[in-house]
Amino acid sequence: MKRRSGIKIVMQLIGLVKPMWLIMTGAVILGVIGYLCATFITILGGYGLLGVLGVQTKMSLHTVFIVVAALAVLRGALRYGEQAGNHYIAFRLLALIRDKVFQKLRKLAPAKLEGKDKGNLIAILTSDIELLEVFYAHTISPVCIAVLTCAVMIAFFASYHPALALIALAGYVTVGVILPMITSKMGKEDGNRYRNQFGEINTYFLDSIRGLREVIQYDCGEERLANIDQQSEALTKLQGRLKNCEGKARANCDCAILAFSFLMLMTSVYLFQKGMLNTEGVVISTISMLGSFGPVTALSNLANNLLHTFASGNRVLELLEEEPLIQEVEEKGAEPSFDGFHIKDLTFSYKQGEEEEQILSDVSLEIPKNGILGIVGKSGSGKSTLIKLLMRFWDAEKGEISISGKPIKEWSTNGLRALESYVIQDTYLFEDTIENNVKLARLGSTHEQVVEACKKANIHEWIESLPNGYDTVIGEGNHQLSGGERQRIGIARAFLHNSEVILLDEPTSNLDSLNEAEILKVLKEQQKDKTIILVSHRQSTMKIADRVIRMKEGRAS
Ligand SMILES: Nc1ncnc2c1ncn2[C@@H]1O[C@H](COP(=O)(O)OP(=O)(O)OP(=O)(O)O)[C@@H](O)[C@H]1O
């Protein structure tokens, strides 16, 4: 994983706030005034104390009480405004980032996502993005607020004596900049490791749940459980180290505040002895120093959370910057006028790190418009790969596939996908009604069109036999479908999509011979005005093909 510096991550994350800078400015202004109100409540307390002790000050005791009450009310209102503004920005931005991540995933799919660690992706989509809330709601404006509030306070100290202003400046820089920098340096590695291990444990968990049947059958539950325990323990250890670092940071911060306040007291007493400061100056400057660390302490505490936030930010930015393997052509509505597939010298290999295994070499093939082409060949001979290349899930490294005289990588990607329907062995069902699951192939189609597609896929009667018919909710945790039922829903989708080209990769592998025969009959009827490409190991399925080609050692014959 690419490691960005903290500054680079911050700059890139701040870049996303641009559309909301007005609200951010408002929140900062409210925050600065709010913190000054809080600090001056303490300072006015000092004036009040001096008044009670009979020392002559700039303000009467009566005025002090009224102003303190007014500042307290104002502080509450301002704090509310600042927090509301910051959280509004943060949650709007999280929605925006999620949207960007989903758009990116769509572009990366399927070529770049096939080999990706799914648990890690889930961790990025959920907890990593969620953690950026800390950055947007509790980092940007607190930094601005701290800088502005400290500037006002330094000017206030300077009104008593420049030396006091210098001590205040040194105190604010130490607590708000130097200590947080040391803390984040100390915990950066652990922060990154924690986020990555969290992703890994997610993947392992997900894998164990998905493969539960195999785990039970081969009795390896204990071993997986032990692995989960081991990973959780490692995670707990890392978390312990991070908390330890956090604790040290808090302790250092408190020590620094006390040390600088003590230095302020000593210096003001010294100046008093030299006649350069009055009693009011000594008391007020010391109280002000103690009471004005609020905004910089907020920064110091942030450094602890930022360890996680930077690691999460890095992972989210990494995903957003990932380049898709194929560049999509965006030209709305430009569907190719289909005249068949013209495949010339097609060579392709999947790249996995440094390794490359050639799957197709110099395949040349003419697939005419309309009719059924069967593709057979040994397992692993590249049949599915050829189909995926026709869908342009990958680009060929040499040679090309063209339609109407133009390579498919120059046709609009949406247009190409609208031209083709792709049915695979294992259809994915979303947690939704059967009707919506089928409608996915053509949003906006009517109930009658869905029923017609399901009738062709020989699944209508089964759907009607369910208590809720087409409104039955299927998918994970709901009505579970058999392999054959899933496959027929996949075929119904392809019929509803009603595209000119239908690519079928082992479409009948889970069907009994009765269902297979019914579906093949419908496919055969469609061959007049559809181009059907069929990959299957079943001889019974291949019978409907007009022409059958064989894949062997990366070539078609
Ligand atoms: N996404 C991928 N990344 C890397 N290698 C892959 C990928 N998909 C397939 N392969 C490899 O490419 C080779 C051809 O796979 P393909 O699925 O095209 O074969 P097939 O002829 O359809 O096999 P089967 O009949 O078993 O479905 C296999 O060795 C497979 O391991």
Image: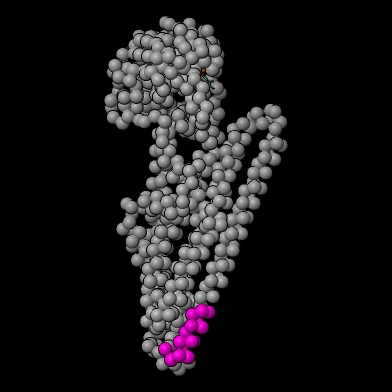
Q: Which residue corresponds to the image point at 60% horizontal and 42% vertical from the top-left?
A: 201
429 vs 135: above or below: above
Q: Which residue corresponds to the image point at 55% horizontal and 15% vertical from the top-left?
A: 379
Which colour assignment does the render follow? one colour
- The residues colored magenta run 262-276
Q: Position of residue 155 (x, y in %)?
A: 37, 76
Q: Which is nearer the eye, 147 or 340?
A: 147
Left or right side of 51 for 262: right
215 vs 156: above or below: above
305 vs 173: above or below: above
Q: Which residue corresponds to the image point at 56% horizontal and 65% vertical from the top-left?
A: 250
Please say whether residue 78 is one of the residues in the magenta stretch. no
Q: Which residue corresponds to the image point at 51% horizontal and 11% vertical from the top-left?
A: 552
Main SS of the magenta segment? Answer: helix
Please say whether residue 265 is one of the residues in the magenta stretch. yes
Q: Position of residue 547 (x, y in %)?
A: 43, 6
Left or right side of 162 for 410: left
Q: Residue furthest bottom?
A: 54
Q: Position of residue 280 (x, y in %)?
A: 43, 88
